[in-house]
Image (tube, rainbow, N blue to C red):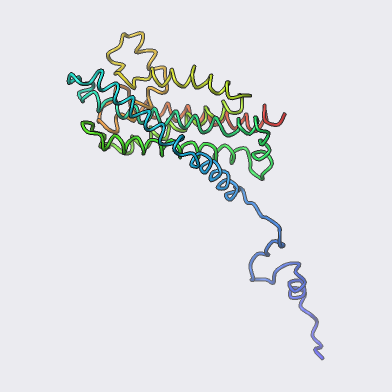
Amino acid sequence: MNDQAPNPSAAAAAAGNRPELGTGPAFAEPGTVRIGTINWGGLKALYMKEVRRFFKVQLQTIWAPAITTMLYLVIFTVALGRSGRTVLDVPFADFLAPGLIVMAMMQNSFANSSFSLLVGKIQGTIIDYLMPPLSELEVLVSLVIAAVTRAFLVGAAVWLAMLLWPGIDVTPQHPLAILWFGLMGAMMLAFMGVLTSVWAEKFDHAAAITNFVVAPLALLSGTFYSVEAMAPAFRTLSHANPFFYVISGFRYGFIGSADSPLLLGAGLLLAINVALGFACYALLRSGWKLRS
């Protein structure tokens, strides 16, 4: 017989109460899920759900916007650019192309994020966003990143089509400017889409924001003209439009010139996105029109 007293640590470890000293942390019981500060698995799952949702109908969500944007390019270059017209010392087609690319990116970012929560409320599946172990911030991040993903896919499709189009030069000159202003524009419209999705109760509400807010701001942002050629009053109004800084900065990445202060625009867009992000988070956390 062994006359030595049993080791309490070993007995406890054998009983499954705690690990023996030096063996590392105890594992969770089978079937127990441990989630850290950030639920990375849930965040990724929601992001993949959103991406797969629009990718299943990619003909409508990616390629159709690219074709529409190319039609804008053809129509405006034929109507205004055939006489050798130049804007900011570059041919009109080269001036127009970058603005069309980022305008398509922003519009599709808004379309994606404004659909997610709204369709859940209409179809009664909003519980799929509220019940999983995801914080409001994780839900917001997933929706915004998915919208930005769609925006960059649309932008890449439009850019490739323009790259192959004869007579247009869309060679990047300042890639960091393209990335920054494209990202800021896509995020800004993604946040606006989330706000719209929370507020809207039917698709007509979201369409109203698209038709009366997003479309006018995009079309009056200097996409088709230089604001420097406008009257002072209209120039001032253009400088109050955040879309103007997105398009001007994005265009600078391709043609090397802009009609707005780049650093001012970059900082202003960052501040707008921070403010919109806090507003989206506050609304999601309050549960307004989501949990009622």
Farthest left residue? 84
Q: Measuring from the top left, give residue 161's x and y in whole percent.
A: 31, 36
Does residue 3 appear left or right of residue 180 in this picture?
Answer: right
Across and down, in percent, residue 268 comes to 42, 26
Position above or below: 55 against 100:
below
Residue 223 in picture, x, y percent from top left: 34, 22
Q: Position of residue 35 (x, y in %)?
A: 64, 52
Quadrant hosting residue 29: bottom right
How many marks are shown on the rendered structure?
A: 0
Quadrant the C terminus occupies: top right
Q: Tell me where residue 169 sits by quadrant.
A: top left
> Image quarter for residue 13?
bottom right
Q: Where 57 sits versus 194, above or below?
A: below
Q: Residue at x 49, y 39 (%)?
A: 57
In-front residue for pair 155/254: 155
Determine whether, in the image, residue 133 is placed left or right of residue 214.
Answer: right
Q: Quadrant of the N terminus?
A: bottom right
